[in-house]
Image (cartoon, helix red, strand yellow):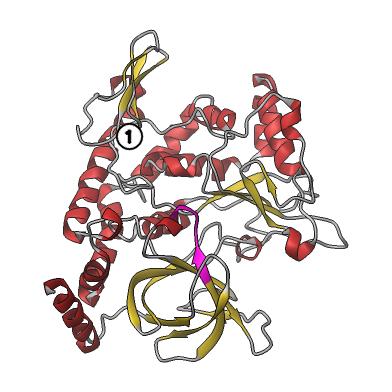
Amino acid sequence: MVRKILYLLSLVWAVQVNGSQLPVVKLTAGDLSASYSKGTFQLEDGEVYSVEIRHRGASALNYAKKAFAVKFVDANGDKLNVSLLGMRSDNSWILDAMAVDKARMRNRVSTDLWNDFARDPYFKTAEPKMLNGTRGEFVEVYLNGEYWGLYCLTEKIDRKQLKLKKIKNDVVKGVLYKSTGWSSLFSEDEAFYNYDNMSPTWHALESSYPELDDEGVVDWKPIADAIRWMSFSDETEVNAHLADKFDLDVWEDYFLFVEFLMADDNICKNQYLYYYDITAEDARMGVAPWDMDHSWGRDYKGDTLCAEVETETWFNRVSYLMQYVYTRLDKTYKQRYDEMRESYFTPEKLKQRFADYFALFRESGAAEREKARWSGTDGITLDFDAEEQYIYDWIDRRFAFMDQKYSTEGIRNIPVSPVQTEKAYKRIINNRVVIVQGKKMYNLMGQEIQIER
């Protein structure tokens, strides 16, 4: 009863706040599911649009607070492009629920950081309006008149966002693949590389462009050829031609980004892999992140993660590429880390990114309304003050770890001192003790000797 009273009072207070309210999205719809159904969308007191809306996500569907995919349509049911909150004009939008994230901002902060620091893909000069990431704005959502909580209204990663070349004269040019599940996709078995260009999926990948339903064709050859090359090439071949196959500036920044955030869920999945134009002589594979809730000290279930750990690398679909960046390009990789350490990757600047959003949530009243609406649901307790301090502490600890890793002596001198309540285990790699995520223990022979730490 007390919680309900506080919830109602917070809604009244929200109406009275001047100048600090978050934008309000009002949705109407019937019974929602993973399939699209008709509804309406209104931003603030603006135009009421006809939309098609559904629940979105994979693991996100397991939570009571659902994410939504929204498609705008005109009176005839055709696509209608709409610009929202200063973002791109498009018919397809995401309302990210962030249900597992106790800060309700990890994905947004991560992608903001990526957009700001990552180097441009090689074709940026040809496509100056391309964006290798998404923009998003926090909103509060009402569904059928009921307060539904804090959401992030977000653009999508697609051909349009990346400005990939369209099919022309039935010739596929730009391609975009979405990694949706755990799979190494790294094999020396030739049968592995069999694919069907009339199938929308291949192993753990989906073809986002071209799409079988829209363009009538997909093209798996570019990604299959790239993985085959990584699987079968020797070191001489890799040294000579890696930069011809992959957009290394982007990949190097991506690995640094994933490593610093400890975003292990964005190594084997939650990536977009793409080619600007596969018919061009300089065609190279790029990468863009998505769905980064597993970051900044919490995993995809919301559990805490030790900051003093190695990022998982040995099961990556392009693990050879990652190993190349970590070892053969170690000098340039360290230089890049040093550059970022003096600019975007300072503790103060990273903490400020979180501080700005936490302040926005508090001052708008959204933090209290979100807690009143969802705290305790699905076993997830919301305490924004405690989570803010946890993130700041984790950032400090992660910096200490990363700074030692990229010192002259490197990882050999990293202290083994994880917080006992966080997930971690020790592994011996090349005669070095390395803490990595998980719950296993190995001896000097690499043998497992303990299940729980």
Residue 175 in view: yes
Which structural element holds mark 1?
Answer: helix
| Front-lying residue, 205 or 290 | 205
Query: Which residue lies at the image location 58% right of the left edge and 32% below the top edge?
Result: 321
- The residue that disc 1 covers is 402
Residue span colored magenta: 54-59
Query: Left or right of 196: which side holds 24?
Result: left
Three-letter code, disc 1: Met
Relative to 282, residue 35 above or below = below
Query: Could you tell me which quadrant the N terminus lies in?
Result: bottom left
Tell me where residue 14 appears, x and y as whole percent: 23, 83
Relative to 392, residue 150 above or below = below
Query: Left or right of 43: which side holds 216?
Result: right
Query: Could you tell me which quadrant the C terminus lies in?
Result: top left
Q: Residue furthest right?
A: 169
Tell me where residue 146 appears, x and y as whole percent: 33, 81
Tell me where residue 39 appears, x and y as whole percent: 52, 82
Residue 409 in view: no
Disc 1 crowd, CA 10 A, few/some/many (<14, 14-19, 20+): many
| Front-lying residue, 53 or 31 | 31
Quarter of the image for residue 6 reads bottom left
Query: Which residue lies at the image location 16% right of the left edge and 82% below the top edge?
Result: 9
Query: Which residue lies at the image location 65% right of the left edge and 90% below the top edge?
Result: 75
Query: Left or right of 330: which side holds 436?
Result: left
Count every numbered label the image shows and give the total.
Answer: 1
The reply to whether the magenta stretch includes residue 149 is: no
